Amino acid sequence: MIEKKFKRVFLALDTNNIKAAENLIKLLKNDLAGLKIGKELFSYYGPNIIKKFKKYKLPIFLDLKFHDIPTTVYKAVKAINSFKVNFLSIHSLGGGNMIRAATKASTFTKILSVQLLSHHDKKSINELGISQSIKNEIRKLTNNALKNGVSGLILAPQDLEIIKKINKNLVVFVPGIRPKNNNKDEHKRSLDHVSAIHKGATYIIVGRPITKSKDPKKSLQLINEDIKSYLENK
């Protein structure tokens, strides 16, 4: 079994099929760093899905990207905190007051902020009324999130350059991981797993390259082996 320090993959359970999700967890649990429960699973099954997956004794990242008025976010985070979820995502576009409300509400769950989703490019952020570059917008949102107490960040792989001077103790989760020469799906700012770790990712979030693989276990093991080789030789 690969050592814990080399386990950097949170499996993205982006499905509404709980049986399929559990079969994957049972197959892969010894090679994972944790589980990511997204909006689809949570919308179908609610908080019971957290209780159900806790039995596998893996850290849980609940990826709900809260973005609402501060009072609503405060109450929602308090509710999630009561389930002892390890990580919860909020959207930094909600602003400083909302971010502070989230971090104040949580005594156990670590709050992670997502800056700009990994499907965005310059054209799509211009449609949102953001005229500056993606890099500058992410830098601004990151600084504001950190100032207001988040425990970690969620960044697209190619945005990792922005955080090079940030505290090394910060937890950085990176979605949009795609093997070289692989279909990137809707992710516009993707990278392969080793490049993401090299650029500063603490954990990588991987879904389809594993879940849609003909051999999910082998696909995960190959990712782990690549990361282990890199970390041992860097």
Image (cartoon, rainbow, N blue to C red):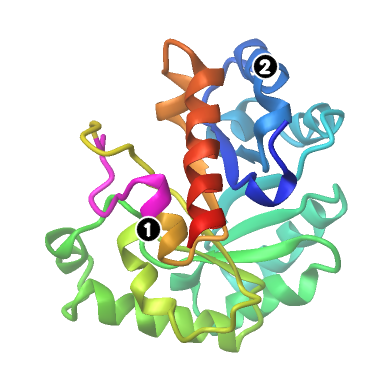
Establish if 218 lies above or below 221. above
Relative placement, left or right, of 23 versus 217 is right
Mark 2 crowd level (few <14, some 14–19, many ≥20, 10 Å Cα): few
Q: Amino acid at mark 2?
A: Leu
Q: Residue 166 in the image: x percent, y percent?
A: 51, 84
Q: Quadrant of residue 69?
A: bottom right
Q: Residue 165 in the image: x percent, y percent?
A: 46, 86
**SS assignment at label 2:** helix
The tag on residue 27 is: 2
Q: Residue 234 in the image: x percent, y percent?
A: 48, 62
For the stretch drawn in magenta, what is the main secondary structure?
loop
Question: For the residues marked 2 and 1, what is the alpha-carbon distance in whole angstroms?
Answer: 27 Å
- Residue 178, magenta (yes or no): no
Magenta residues?
184-195
Q: Quadrant of residue 145?
A: bottom right
Q: Amino acid at mark 1?
A: Ala
Q: Is residue 108 visible?
A: yes
Establish if 203 lies above or below 151. above
